[in-house]
Amino acid sequence: MEYDHLSPLVQETLKTSSPKGNIVIEQGEYAYLKTPVDEKQETLIVFQDFNKERAALRFLITALGITGLACLILSFIGSVFMASRVMIPIQKAWQQQKNFLADASHELRTPLAIIQTNLDIVRANQEEKVANQEKWLNNIQEATTNMTKLVDSLLFLARADSHEQLLVRDCFSLNQAVMTAVEPFKPVAESKGICVEVKTESAISYSGDENRIKQLIGILLDNAIRHTPSGGKVAVHLHQANKMAILSVSDTGEGIGSEHLNKIFERFYQVDQSRSKGGAGLGLAIAKWIVENHHGTISASSSLNEGTTMIVKLPVEK
């Protein structure tokens, strides 16, 4: 305490009747304690300067307030950020569901429209014999077949999304599964003037769902045949490298642009927007699910006007 503060401080203290308390002067606030000294008719006054402590306390309170406010603001910003991050997959899933329903409705509408149109033609010519209306009836049958395939694919993916699509695992010959899966497609390919070549190496024993593996091969082969022109070639090769069974299905079709390659495994995605090649764009999505649930990978490489190769890699237990 500086001495020039003492005079006003003492004067103010002597004016008070209380033996202790606080005195506020221009220089700050002080605590005092006074007691008379009888022998000399004097008064003993003791002062305590709390200004530094009070300043430190005010600084601490201010710092805590600012820190608390900053934490509150940061917490709010963090919660908003985390909420937005959490909402991204939910929004994506919701959008995918909306797109799925819209695309499914569109795909179902097409065969239904074909069936309705051809039925109208048949009804308009009721006097005609059935043999004379074979063209329209064949159109109805083809549309019905396509719609059945589409519904089956939709049900497959719906069960897959709800984790109800289970695999029945067993040990089987992967070579034999390939040969069996390819056989039904040979007449279709031959009728279009397409050569189907199948090459497999030494027997590969594989543990998985044989029916789903055959379905996978069928999907890839069907795609290859649909996109290969007359006089073209489709090659199915199977070999083993280390602990991986590698299946490739190649065609000599129109090829796929690089901007489409990373999207062809999405549901309902079709490179040919006119859909002149047929299909609903679900096959490769199903193929991807089958491969991934066998802990494998599927990829595509392509060159425009030269063809496309689908490569499936499946882990083989030795």
Image (spheres, rainbow, N blue to C red):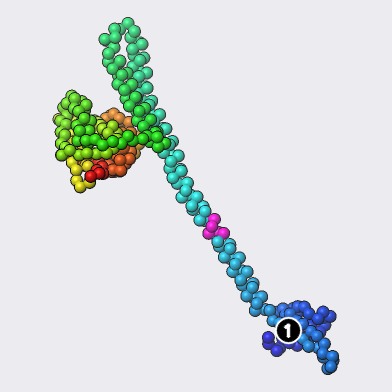
Magenta segment, which residues? 72-76
Question: In the rendered view, does 153 fall on the left or right side of 318?
Answer: right
Quadrant occupied by the C terminus:
top left
For residue 11, above or below residue 220? below
Q: Is the magenta region chiefly helix, strand or loop?
A: helix
Residue 153: which quarter of the image? Answer: top left
Residue 160: x %, y % from top left: 38, 36
Q: Nearer the viewer, residue 72 or 153?
A: 153
User: What amino acid type should be assigned to the residue bearing mark 1?
Assistant: Phe
Is residue 175 covered in magenta?
no
Vertical order, 237 against 9 (above or below): above
Q: Quadrant of the N terminus?
A: bottom right
Residue 3 in percent (x, y) is at 70, 89
The one nearer the camera, 242 or 56, is 242
Given residues 155 and 6, the one toward you in this image is: 155
> What's the residue at 68%, 87% (across, down)?
2
Quarter of image, res 184: top left
- Residue 148 visible somewhere in the drawing: yes
**In this image, 191 relative to 208: left or right?**
left
